[in-house]
Image: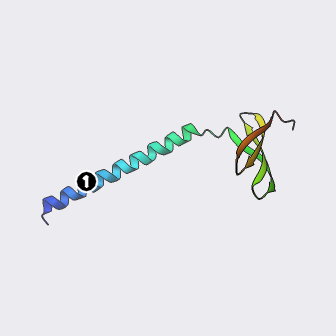
C-alpha cells in the first residue's frame, strides 16, 4: 500500500470518528433539553403480576395512574398528601 493511500484512509477514519463524537454530543444535549426531570415517581404498589398503581408527580401535580399490560390510565388527579 502506498503512503498516500494510508494517509487518505487515516484521514477518512479520523473524520468519521469526529462526526460520530459530534453526533453523540448533540444527541445528549437534545435529550437533556427534552427531558427536564419535571416528572418523578412518588410511590408504586404492585397489585398483581401485570398491574400496579403509580403516584407520579408532574410539575407539582400528583397523579394516580393505573398501569397494566393493556396500557396506562389516569385514575385521579390532585391527590392529597
64 lies left or right of 31: right
Rendered residue at 78%/37% (across/down): 62
Q: Where, by quadrant of the figure, is residue 11 drawn?
A: bottom left
Rendering coords of residue 27 (x, y %): 47, 44
72 lies left or right of 36: right
Rendering coords of residue 60 (x, y %): 75, 33
Quarter of the picture containing the N terminus is bottom left
Q: Which residue is outermost to the bottom?
A: 1
Q: Nearer the viewer, residue 60 or 72?
A: 72
Q: Which residue is outermost to the right?
A: 80
Look at the numbered disc 1 and give the secondary structure of its residue: helix
- Figure coloring: rainbow
Q: Where, by quadrant of the figure, is residue 14 drawn?
A: bottom left
Rendering coords of residue 40 (x, y %): 71, 43
Quick one: label 1, few (<14), some, or many (20+) residues within 10 Å? few
Quarter of the picture containing the C terminus is top right
Rendered residue at 18%/61% (across/down): 6
Q: Nearer the viewer, residue 47 or 28?
A: 47
**Count of all numbered marks drawn on residues in the image:** 1
Q: Which residue is mark 1?
A: 12
26 lies left or right of 18: right
Rendered residue at 53%/42% (across/down): 31
Task: Establish if 5 lies above or below 28.
Answer: below
Rendered residue at 44%/48% (across/down): 24
Rendering coords of residue 8 (x, y %): 19, 56
Amino acid at each position: 500500500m502506498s503512503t498516500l493511500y494510508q494517509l487518505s484512509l487515516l484521514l477518512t477514519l479520523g473524520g468519521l470518528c469526529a462526526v460520530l463524537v459530534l453526533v453523540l454530543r448533540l444527541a445528549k444535549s437534545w435529550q437533556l433539553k427534552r427531558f427536564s426531570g419535571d416528572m418523578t415517581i412518588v410511590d408504586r404498589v404492585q397489585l398483581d403480576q401485570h398491574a400496579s398503581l403509580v403516584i407520579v408527580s408532574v410539575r407539582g401535580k400528583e397523579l394516580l395512574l393505573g398501569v397494566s399490560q393493556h396500557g396506562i390510565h389516569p385514575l385521579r388527579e390532585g391527590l392529597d398528601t
